[in-house]
Every structure is written in C-alpha cells, then in structure tokens.
C-alpha cells in the first residue's frame, strides 16, 4: 500500500523529489488514513489507475465500487451535519481534483462549488488547518 501512496504522491507533485517537499506524503496521507471517506477516495483512485495500467475491467469495477462507497459515506456525513471536518474538506478537494483530471469538468466544478460553500461556512480558508490549505487551493 505504501507503494501506491508513493505513486499517487509523486503523480500529484512530480517535482517533489527535486524539492524534497511533498504535501501529499507529509500531510494529507497521514490524515487520510484516519478518515474513511478520504481513504475510500484514494483507494478508488488507486484502483482506477491500476485498471488503466493493466487494462483490467475488474479493477475498474472495483474503482467504481470504492468511489460509490465514498460518496455514500460522504452523503451520510452531509445529511447528519458531520461535514465540516478538515478531513471531509480534503476528501471533497480530492474528488474535485480527480474529476478534473478525468476531464469531467462539470463534476469537478460541482465538487469545487460545494467545497467553497463548506469552507465559507467554516469561516474561510484561515479556519482550515494550515497543512491542508494548499489542498483547498488546488
């Protein structure tokens, strides 16, 4: 699993090996491991990447299944009011970034607008933990 996180981190920040700074490895993954929604999103992204590399439709189905579970859990959080944690905001930022990278700009903008509203409800970017602010900016 460490290998997949490394691949995602270096894919997200390709120059990080030169800069010796990778926020994904240093800040986001440790927090993501403690949050089920964010973890499902990253695992889904990993499964989709693996499906693309191996051209395996089973892995693509796994990716969809993991993403559906992440969305189900995220919707549950929103319906119960447990939506304003830094981890939830990080998970939504991942969804926006991932949708954009897949070329699904409509979904990306929907996630980004929802993220902006949640950040506004929280009190703006200054209310977000500094280790996650760059994730929100992206």
Image: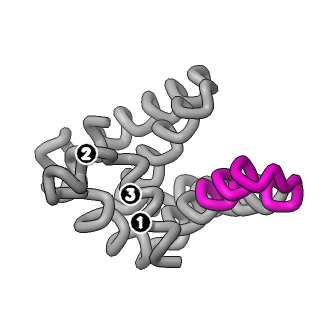
Residue beneath label 1, please?
6
2 or 1: tag closer to the N-terminus: 1
Residue beneath label 3, please?
9
Q: Are discs 2 and 3 less than 8 Å apart at CB?
A: no
- Residue at 71% from the left image edge and 62% from the top image edge: 66
Left or right relative to 111: residue 47: right
Q: Is residue 45 magenta?
A: yes
Label of residue 15 in the image: 2
Crowd class of label 2 (few under 14; some 14 to 19; many from 20; radius 10 Å)? few
Q: Is residue 130 magenta?
A: no
Image position of 117 with respect to 65: above or below: above
Q: Nearer the viewer, residue 40 or 26?
A: 26
- Residue 93 visible in this rendered orientation of the protein: yes
Helix, strand or loop status at disc 1: helix
- Residue at 88% from the left image edge and 53% from the top image edge: 57
Crowd class of label 3 (few under 14; some 14 to 19; many from 20; radius 10 Å)? some
Q: Position of residue 80 (x, y in %)?
A: 54, 61
Q: Position of residue 116 (x, y in %)?
A: 35, 33
């Amino acid at each position: 699993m460490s290998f997949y996180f490394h691949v995602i981190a270096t894919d997200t920040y390709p120059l990080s090996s030169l800069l010796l700074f990778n926020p994904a490895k240093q800040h986001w993954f440790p927090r993501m491991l403690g949050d089920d929604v964010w973890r499902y999103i990253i695992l889904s992204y990993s499964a989709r990447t693996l499906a693309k590399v191996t051209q395996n439709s089973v892995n693509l189905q796994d990716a969809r299944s993991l993403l559906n579970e992440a969305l189900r859990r995220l919707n549950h959080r929103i319906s119960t009011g447990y939506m304003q944690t830094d981890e939830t905001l990080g998970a939504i930022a991942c969804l926006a970034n991932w949708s954009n990278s897949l070329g699904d700009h409509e979904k990306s903008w929907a996630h980004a607008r929802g993220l902006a509203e949640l950040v506004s409800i929280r009190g703006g970017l200054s209310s977000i933990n500094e280790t996650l602010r760059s994730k929100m900016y992206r």
